[in-house]
Image: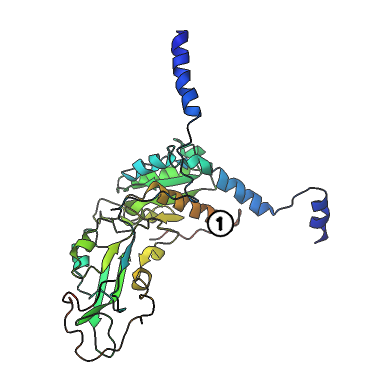
Amino acid sequence: MGLESKLGNMGVVTARLEDIVNWGRTNAMWPLGFGLACCAIEMMSAQASHYDLSRFGMELMRASPRQADLMIVAGRVSRKMAPVLRRLYDQMPDPKWVLSMGDCASCGGVFNNYAIVQGVDEIVPVDVYVAGCPPRPEALIDGIVKLHEKVRRSHPLKGDREPIRG
Amino acid sequence: MLTEIFKGLSITLRELFKPPVTIQYPEIKRPVRQRFRGRHELRRYADGLERCIGCALCAAACPADAIYVEPAENTDAERYSPGERYAKTYEINMLRCIFCGYCEDACPTDAIVLTDVYELAADKRRDLIYTKDMLILPPPSGKPGTPQQVAEGSYPRSILPEGLVSEP
């Protein structure tokens, strides 16, 4: 295209709208504070000064789902907690993402019993699973970086979500 | 009251000139502790044979039932590990594993060890079930992989006496 080269001479940068929207989404993705068990301690540690999630624009753990973009499910989800989790997910405004942190949230982990939901993907669509029991703060940040890559790859308007299992 | 304010602000001033404690994680990685337990790996002997003999003691010791082992018979024409059997399928579900290291303790041949890799994230659950190909180390340089063709009766025992095969 001739347009870009002409605009480039004028000191104007052109970009695709999708890229700009995804850039905005990845750089201010406020998480919902959803600590359920010991993974929450590592999540707090990831927020603290040694790992400092605010480097990724995630310094605010919102208490209200209405202000959150990302739900970090940190810990085991009991059957009694499951409807609450789904309700909080439904209350989050679009676009929204879910990160399943740790073994228990991802597939029940060591708690293979009737009381624990065997994977939070039974109730909400999960974008990234982070393994570890609990994962180190670095492992959580690695999961978040992978989620950011996934968001950058996706189209802002087309939902490329997989259907909920079960 | 004014002195207290300056006393408090002196701490702020002092901290201002200290270097920041933040580790710039994806670029700079903090070294893990010596006994850190992360992702598993399956080791080999110095001659390229697999250490794992498919006994499934790791699977029995696993408190989270994360390990699945399916053994098969070794022959001298197609030898994977010393002794009678080898692990045909070896899978660890990283989303079940709690990195307790009991598998490492249970292993009679020191085949499975926990490394210091902790970056285990994927967008599908299936990608976090690690198969034998993903877990096993490559053979030592210049040595063939498995299966190997060996002389008849050269590996009668699963657990080798000291000195028969040198340590890696």
Q: Quadrant of residue A119?
A: bottom left
Q: Amino acid at mark 1?
A: Gly
Residue B59, horizontal then vertical, whole percent: 22, 66
Residue B138, horizontal then vertical, whole percent: 37, 73
* Image coloring type: rainbow
**Quadrant assignment for the N terminus of chain A:** bottom right
Q: Residue at x 64, y 53 (%)?
A: A19
Q: Residue at x 20, y 67 (%)?
A: B107
Residue to which mark 1 is pinned = A159
Image height of A97 relative to A160, above or below: above
Q: How many marks?
A: 1
Q: Quadrant of residue B55?
A: bottom left
**Quadrant assignment for the C terminus of chain A:** bottom left
**Residue B79 visible in rendering:** yes
Chain hosting mark 1: A
Query: B137 or A115: nearer the eye?
Result: B137
Image height of A130 relative to B135, above or below: above
Residue B160, horizontal then vertical, whole percent: 18, 77
**Residue A154 visible in rendering:** no
Task: Work out which residue is located at the far top of the displayed protein and give it.
Answer: B1
Residue B15, horizontal then vertical, whole percent: 47, 28
Query: A85 or A76: nearer the eye?
Result: A76
Q: Residue at x 47, y 14 (%)?
A: B6
Image height of A80 relative to B126, above or below: above
Image height of B159 relative to B38, above or below: below
Q: Secondary structure at mark 1?
A: loop
Q: Is residue B73 left or right of residue A45?
A: left
- Classed neighbour count for the residue bearing mark 1: other residues with Cα under 10 Å, few (<14), some (14–19), many (≥20): few
Query: A78 or B41: nearer the eye?
Result: B41
